[in-house]
Image: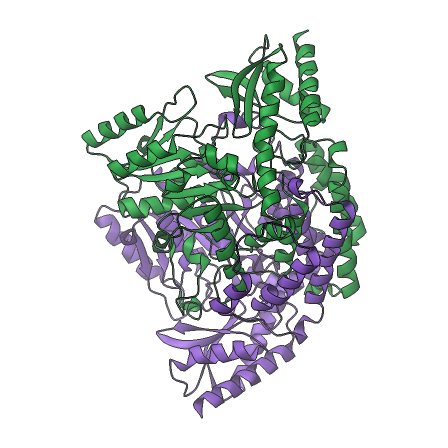
Chain colours: A purple, B green
Amino acid sequence: MRADRLELDREEMRRLGYRAVDMLVEEWTGLSQKPVGRKAGREELMAALQEPPPREGAPPEVVFERLARDVFPNLLRIHHPRFFAFVPGPSNFAAAVGDFLAAGHNVFAGNWLSGSAASAMELVVTGWLRDLCGLAPGAEGLFVSGGSVANLTGLAVARHAMLGNRLEGAVAYLSEQTHSSVERALRILGLLPEQIRRLGVNDHFQLSIHDLRAAVAADRAEGKRPFCVVGNAGAVNTGAVDPLNELADFCEAEDLWLHVDGAFGAAAAISERGRRELKGLDRADSLSLDPHKWLFQPYEAGCVFVRQGSLLKETFRITAEYLRDVHRPSEEVHFCDRGVQLTRGFRSLKVWLTFQIFGLDAIQRAVERGFELADYGEERLRGMPEFELVTSAKMAVVTFRRRGLSEQAYLEVVARMLEDGYAFLTSTVIRGKAALRLCTINPRTTKEDIDFTLDRLSRICSELLR
Amino acid sequence: MRADRLELDREEMRRLGYRAVDMLVEEWTGLSQKPVGRKAGREELMAALQEPPPREGAPPEVVFERLARDVFPNLLRIHHPRFFAFVPGPSNFAAAVGDFLAAGHNVFAGNWLSGSAASAMELVVTGWLRDLCGLAPGAEGLFVSGGSVANLTGLAVARHAMLGNRLEGAVAYLSEQTHSSVERALRILGLLPEQIRRLGVNDHFQLSIHDLRAAVAADRAEGKRPFCVVGNAGAVNTGAVDPLNELADFCEAEDLWLHVDGAFGAAAAISERGRRELKGLDRADSLSLDPHKWLFQPYEAGCVFVRQGSLLKETFRITAEYLRDVHRPSEEVHFCDRGVQLTRGFRSLKVWLTFQIFGLDAIQRAVERGFELADYGEERLRGMPEFELVTSAKMAVVTFRRRGLSEQAYLEVVARMLEDGYAFLTSTVIRGKAALRLCTINPRTTKEDIDFTLDRLSRICSELLR
């Protein structure tokens, strides 16, 4: 080792790398027999981790011991087959190896000069996703850190294309079921709270076209400038899919931009069932989609598409004198021109590797399985009289209540499930009342996992009611 | 393998992982004897990579062969000891292993519930960087994807704190040497081009306080609302450091926010020399700093600090019903509340691992070495009559011209250096004229690397002049 050059010998590198592989192979082997993870308190964690930066290095085995003792056990396993909370990140081992290869080669995917093969691969893989989701061939996209930046990117293009970036009087429309990252993105883009209309939903938790029409008309009458409607392709709360075709018709007629937030759901469009559930997805002017959710990638992997692809570059392109060697032949694509990041890692590699190792057929079946597991969960819940279904299985989400349980008790149920460690799910609020929620997009989840989870849940609820 | 569950057997995982380790150990062993990399054309790359998504998976060895043949050779090695272009990313192998561990454990570092240990580690590591850079204890920070989002984050806080997010008449000030990502960030935040003053620089390429004072006064006289000044802590072009103390005095007196773009240079403040060069850095209201540059991390690792830490949360916090189980005890820190991303990977792990494996002393020496190498480069250039120094070594950047070389020839020199493959450096424009530029922050660079690179460069220039 030459520490002051941050350099390891060949053998040191190999040992360190193999050790990491061994640790991760252990993690992924028999995952189902392990707990879903643990949340530790700040005091406990700080006692273990708080220290001044060490002046001297420590042997890798000592460092790994600390990680194995203090760090990795104190995380939730979002990739666990019985992690049904929020939106699970099922991930896959091969893709994690892809992230390692990208980090190890220190790939810069911001421009063609530094990362020509990475840029080409991003063209190929975004092309696959574009076609698989049924988007038009002229649509262009890029990988980003996740849904938040995907939404920010799509909405920035909307602002540019529809408003010439002038915000006075601009108004955007979304539903009360729209993910909060959309509102945050709009705020970052400079819209004030009064420029964001959070509209009601119908019985299926879909944006009401009727309310939308009325709101747009009222705003126009007041001289406001409606410019953008945000539709949901799988709202996280209940899996609701807004009526995308109707929204697209309305937006066309009214000259509005349709941004579809498919961070959770849109990747499901690569499967037949998903395609059916997401009719009209192809009509989005911009679309966000998170491969680190239902496309089984490790964090971070978001993706965004814009139907009129050239608008991405129009919105984001920057130049700089010290970058002048970069901006040359037009056949070269500089992904830094398409989004907020100049320096960008090689996110497309892990997605490519997943397709190469497992193949599209298997990935499509893995997506379909998410739908089927939620259907199964619904069926099981219908057979358990102590539970009451709130929303049926939709986009792999099912929500329900435990009869007789008080509002406050739901948080306690969730806390006890976590403490128990067998499975994890979270609560939410639906029509003003607490509910439990299962999101079943992990293809490694079995029906037994769902059976046992619901049994365990039932028991915990009963204990609380006693 | 259970392909439709995206599941590999223990032995398959191990083989895949070891294969990746072996590939990366080969990459990092004897790096100096390898070319700095290659840029391939789109046609060539698409011929190799363009295909429909494969329906069936392929054996890992076949997939790795494709990567080894078509992908990794067609990238620049930003971590190569003779990569002097743009801002190098020296990276280090141990940190890449950190990224692998983070991806393999699929860590969600967005909130305390899902990632308590990751959140605690981010508190610890951002605390280290805060203290090492001499920032006040009340400063809070977070890891982000890189300088672009770091600047976006800091400037979003400025907009919130100084303008209550109302953009009418707002004006921001920066110098013509400020990185284009700052302007892009301001545009994303809703400022129009006419709200951004790009001011001239003095002989040292520093923002002129005189011009700044005049511009602010003129804007105030017109009823505009100056709110933010952007200072450079190492402008990429020449390494210029704006007079941060004077800027801070001015901003205090004028009630303006001081954002310091230290994406390239600020990490150097962990060393004694860097601290001297960056006097006044601690007075920034917000500061961006990229560990994936001069702190030797693989892409992506940016970082941003805000002096009054609580403003981050005030600016970015969002809530959602399905996240209600997350927002509980106040001792828990949710990093998703501090920036644009909700889902966030575990970026702090690789930085922590670098400190644990190599130790602070070594890292500080590695930073110092960057300064020394540029000093050495300057000395060598002064001894070569065919070259003319344009700016002396500053923050590990030195710029120079080849006497007699036409403006257009500079791009050709760069192209030939790349073709040659021994070393890479890029050109820029300084005071309206082309110049060559060395950025020497890779601690594995030797003096001989610089000698031979300049010799090679000299020869290529001579050939072009013949």
Name the residue at 73% across, 41% down.
B28
Looking at the image, residue B47 sits to the left or right of residue B126; the answer is right
Q: Position of residue A200 (x, y in %)?
A: 33, 64
Q: Position of residue B136 (x, y in %)?
A: 39, 48
Picture quadrant of residue B56: bottom right
Looking at the image, residue B353 sits to the left or right of residue A403; the answer is right
Name the residue at 33% across, 61% down.
A199
Q: Position of residue A163 (x, y in %)?
A: 34, 40
Name the residue at 62% across, 69% down.
A80
User: Closer to the camera, A388 or B29?
Assistant: B29
User: Closer to the camera, B41 or B345?
Assistant: B345
Let me know if residue A18 appears in the view: yes
Position of the C terminus of chain A, as image quadrant, is: bottom left
Looking at the image, residue A448 sits to the left or right of residue A243; the answer is right
Q: Residue furthest bottom?
A: A466
Position of the N terminus of chain A, as image quadrant, is: top right
Q: Position of residue A27 (x, y in %)?
A: 68, 66
